[in-house]
Image (cartoon, grey):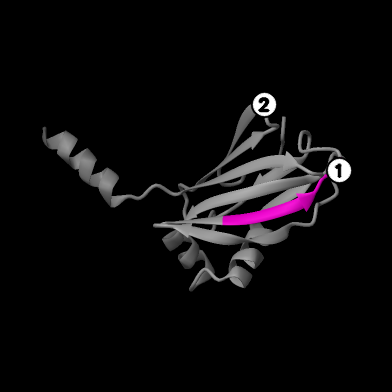
């Protein structure tokens, strides 16, 4: 009983450090919707989660490259809040679709050693999940 209680306290005392990036394709663009906890983003940004600060941070931590290795320009498309969660939006041109693009999500690794970034990619029919931990290289969207 005592060990269970100690484990429960450890779990409550240690928050989960994750982000979720949903990657989809449509109309010649890749759309990225990044979900993060507001307090984690405020800590990373050193203040409020403004559009300009969030866009700058995301562009420095999220990369997409085409099949030839060329980095795609990420365009900011806003944010929305839902309770403790912030959804951040980016998109990039991708005339040949999302599959085969190289993606790297490096969010919050500078803050948390246990950070995990999940990417869920979909082509409208199938869904793939990619997992990024500190030091992981870019990965192809299957």
Name the residue at 60% across, 43% down: 22
For the C terminus, give its image quadrant. Answer: top right
> Where residue 47 sits: x, y (%)?
48, 73
Magenta region, main secondary structure: strand
Relative side of 25 to 16, left or right: right
Q: Please tell me in which quadrant of the rendered image residue 20 appears.
A: top right
Mark 1 neighbour density, 10 Å: few (under 14) some (14–19) many (20 or more):
few
Name the residue at 48% across, 59% down: 81
Q: Which residue appears farthest toward the top when viewing the image?
A: 126
Question: Over which residues does the magenta segment extend?
Answer: 88-95
Residue 136 visible, this orientation: no
Foreground: 102 or 122?
122
Foreground: 2 or 58?
58
Q: Which mark is residue 85?
A: none
For the N terminus, give its image quadrant. Answer: top left
Name the residue at 16% across, 35% down: 3
Question: Which residue is disc 1 drawn over?
Answer: 95
- Examine the rendered structure and indicate whether residue 100 appears above or below residue 43: above
> Where residue 108 sits: x, y (%)?
53, 56
Q: CA distance from mark 1 to mark 2?
A: 19 Å
Question: Which residue is disc 2 drawn over?
Answer: 125
* Sequence-wise first label, 1 or 2: 1
> Where residue 98 sits: x, y (%)?
76, 38
Q: Please tell me in which quadrant of the rendered image residue 123 appears.
A: top right
Mark 2 neighbour density, 10 Å: few (under 14) some (14–19) many (20 or more):
few
- Examine the rendered structure and indicate whether residue 35 appears above or below residue 119: below
- Examine the rendered structure and indicate whether residue 36 appears above or below residue 103: below
Name the residue at 45% across, 47% down: 114
């Amino acid at each position: 009983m005592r060990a269970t209680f100690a484990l429960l306290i450890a779990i409550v005392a240690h928050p989960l450090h994750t982000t979720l990036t949903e990657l989809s394709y449509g109309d010649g663009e890749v759309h990225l919707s990044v979900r993060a906890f507001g307090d984690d983003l405020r800590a990373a940004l050193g203040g409020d989660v403004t559009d300009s600060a969030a866009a700058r941070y995301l562009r420095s931590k999220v990369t997409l490259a085409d099949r030839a290795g060329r980095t795609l320009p990420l365009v900011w498309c806003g944010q929305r809040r839902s309770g403790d969660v912030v959804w951040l939006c980016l998109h990039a041109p991708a005339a040949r679709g999302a599959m085969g693009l190289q993606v790297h999500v490096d969010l919050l690794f500078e803050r948390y050693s246990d950070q995990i970034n999940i990417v869920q990619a979909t082509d409208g029919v199938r869904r793939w999940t990619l997992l990024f931990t500190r030091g992981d290289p870019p990965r192809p969207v299957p």
